[in-house]
Image: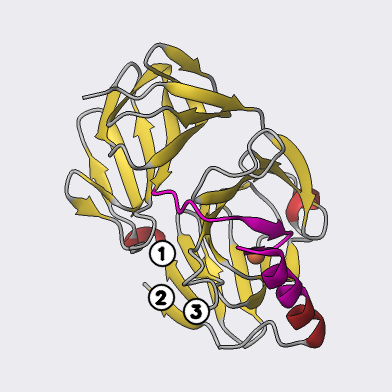
Amino acid sequence: MTVRMIKQFIQAQAVSEGAGVTVHRTIGTPALRHLDPFLMLDYFNSDNPDDYIAGFPDHPHRGFVTLTYMLDGHMLHRDSMGNEGDLRSGGAQWMKAASGVIHSEMPRQIDGLMRGFQLWINLPGSEKMSAPGYQEYSPEALPVVQTADAKVKVLIGAYQNTPGPIVDPITSVHYLDVTLQAHATFDFALPTELQGFIYVFEGDASVAGTNLPTHSFAVLAEGDSLAVRAGADGARFILVAGKPLREPIVQYGPFVMNSRDEINQAINDYNNGTLVQQRAAMIRD
Ligand code: FE2
C-alpha cells in the first residue's frame, strides 16, 4: 500500500467568463493545462449579485462533459433545443456536450450567496461526436454517508459501498464532497490508475503532513490510499479522481478535440449553425 502525498499546488487564477462573471480557475491555467481526464475546474463564490447576475448566456461546447455542482444558489440552464433545468443548492448537473450543445447557465436569484464548482471531464475520441445528454440531480438525490466524524456526499463513484447516481463508465470518476469534524481523518482507497485532486473550500486539512489551507487546490501524487486530516476548525473539500485517457488534447475555448482538423470542423459547424446535431436527452432525479 502506498499512501498518496501532495504532488503540486495550484494557485487559482481569477478569470472573467460568460457575461463578466469572475471564476477562480485551477485546472485549465498555464500552471496546470490539464489533469487528464480533467480539462478545467472553476470555483465560483460571491455574495454580490453584481458579480454573477449576468450569468453565462448562450455558448457552445463540444467534445467533453461538464459537471456543475451548486453549493449555494440557484441556476437555470436552458439549451437551444428547449431543454430546461433548474439547479438548486446542493444539486448537480452532468452534461455530456459530446457532438455539440449550445446552452445558457443563468443565476435565478437576485441576492444571496452563489457558490459552486464546474468541472470539465474529457471524452475519448470515440465518444466526442456521440449524442449529447443532460442528467440533473436534486440535493435529495445525492446520497450522504454520515459517520461519527464525517459527512460524505457522493456525486460520482462510491463511498463505503454507497454509489452516487451519476454513472461515468469511461473515466471511472469519483467526486465526493467531504465535511470533516475538527482533527478527524478521512481514509479512502483510491486505485493507482486514477489521477486526482483535492480542493479545500472550508477550514483546513492536511495530507501526509502537508498543510492545505482554505482554497488550496492540490494534485495528489501516485499511490493507492489517501488520508485527509482536518485542522482545528474542521474541513470541507471535494475529492475528485478519474482514469486518464492519454489521448492528444487540442482545445480551442469551449471545443476540446483530438486534432486541429476536428477543432476547425467545430468552428465551421458553429459558424454554419450546425454544431448542434442531436437534441440532448434530459434525465432528472
Ligand atoms: Fe456551459
Callout 3: few (<14), some (14-19), or many (20+) C-alpha neighbours within 10 Å?
Answer: some
Ligand 1 is located in which of the four quadrants?
bottom right
The residue under the point 40% across, 43% down is: 241
What amino acid type is highlighted by mark number 1? Ser
Sequence-earlier tag: 1 or 3: 3
Nearer to us: label 1 or label 2: 2
Type of the residue with mark 2: Arg
Residue type, mark 3 in image? Ser
Q: Is residue 87 visible?
A: yes
Q: Earlier in the sequence, mark 1 or mark 2?
A: 1
As drawn, the label of residue 284 is: 2
Q: Are marks 1 and 2 in contact (CB under 8 Å)?
A: yes
Residue to which mark 1 is pinned: 138
Residue 117 appears in the picture as rendered? no
Range shown magenta = 243-267
Q: Is residue 203 magenta?
A: no
- Front-most of residues 206 and 180: 206
